[in-house]
Image (cartoon, rainbow, N blue to C red):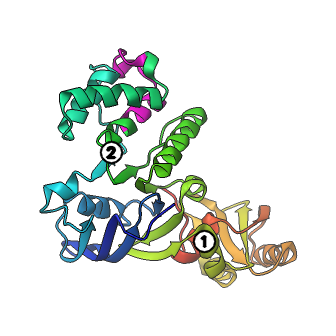
Amino acid sequence: MPTDTPVLVVENARRAFGPRQALAGVGLVLRPGEIYALVGRNGAGKTTLIRAICGRVRLDAGSVRLGGADPAVDPGARRRLGLVPQEIALYPDLTALENLEILGQLAGLSAADARRRSREALDWIGLADRATSRVSTLSGGMRRRVNIAAGVLHEPALLLLDEPTVGVDPQARERIHEMLASLRARGMAILLTTHDLDQAALLADRIGIIDDGVLRAEGTLSQLIATTLGHAREIVVRLAVPPSGEAQCAVLQQLGLVQDPADPVRLTGVVAGDMAEALAAGRRLAEAGLSAAELSVREPSLYGVYFQVTGKELVE
């Protein structure tokens, strides 16, 4: 379980790139044994925040502290950090064991320690039998597991994970989730950035929703639901044809329904009551010439929280 001593403290982090404010006063705290999921669209500020934590981006204002030190100026602070990027960061022509040994030494381990920990890591990720296989011959899920192992060989206090299960099959995804749970049990703090709201809801002790460089909401899933949705329900409508004209758009606004940017006939919103209220919304749509081909109501979830907080669907 998390202790009271933070591993990571970010306070009022601000960073602009020209006129664009990538971070507009973000603050968060992570403690040992805690998984924190940071969710948001591309361009929301996740990557800039991760780079600031790694010491690769200098903030215009605010601070980042890893174990009380600034990673931008203190190499010791950076050694407390493990990073697993979204793109596989392995040498494809080397074996899994060779990759881990090299990356372990680059992280500061001696050759002997790197070799010992690499073999232990291959056992841990269930790939001891593929130690001498070239990475290029491994499946996507296997490469992800090796990549995560490489990020924790030096036993960092904080692990940064960027979309750890993108492009992997369900079985590999489940194995990776087990690995992350075991790291948390060892007391490692994990900052996870993801577009997968189901994954965030399943894994994270706390969730932060970032949008336009601002941390719009933060808390446990139950806290986020209670403070944003309460007893409301999510409504999802699929229209026969996309809305058009000012009158139809005005009806959507009155009903609090927002189009999915990637699917213009899909609308999402929130209703305070039950299916009867959703059906009433469906009738309003029909009166405006917008026939609903499908209409459903679902229990409060992180999807509804995200929509309520940002007014957007998490679509990439």
| Disc on the earlier residue, 1 or 2 | 2
Secondary structure, mark 1, is helix
Q: How many numbered discs?
A: 2
Which range is magenta?
Answer: 130-147
Task: Tell whether position 146 is magenta.
Answer: yes
- Image point 33% across, 45% down: which residue? 155
Residue at label 2?
Answer: 155
Mark sitting on residue 171: none
Classified by dominant secondary structure, the portion drawn in magenta counts as: helix
In the displayed image of the protein, which residue is found farthest to the right?
276
Give the label, 1 or 2, closer to the camera: 2
Give me the residue at 35% from left, 75% from top: 27
Q: Residue furthest left?
A: 73
* Quarter-of-image position of residue 68: bottom left
- Determine contact: label 1, label 2, CB under 8 Å: no
Residue 221 in sight from this viewpoint: yes
Three-letter code for the amino acid on which mark 1 is drawn: Val
Instruction: Assess disc 2: are there few (<14), some (14-19) or many (≥20) residues with their C-alpha within 10 Å of its C-alpha.
Output: some
Lateral position of residue 133 relative to residue 238, left or right = left
User: Which residue is the site of mark 1?
Assistant: 305
Q: Nearer the viewer, residue 3 or 182?
A: 3
Amino acid on which disc 2 is placed: Glu
Rendered position, 219 above or below 145: below
Q: Nearer the viewer, residue 188 or 269?
A: 188
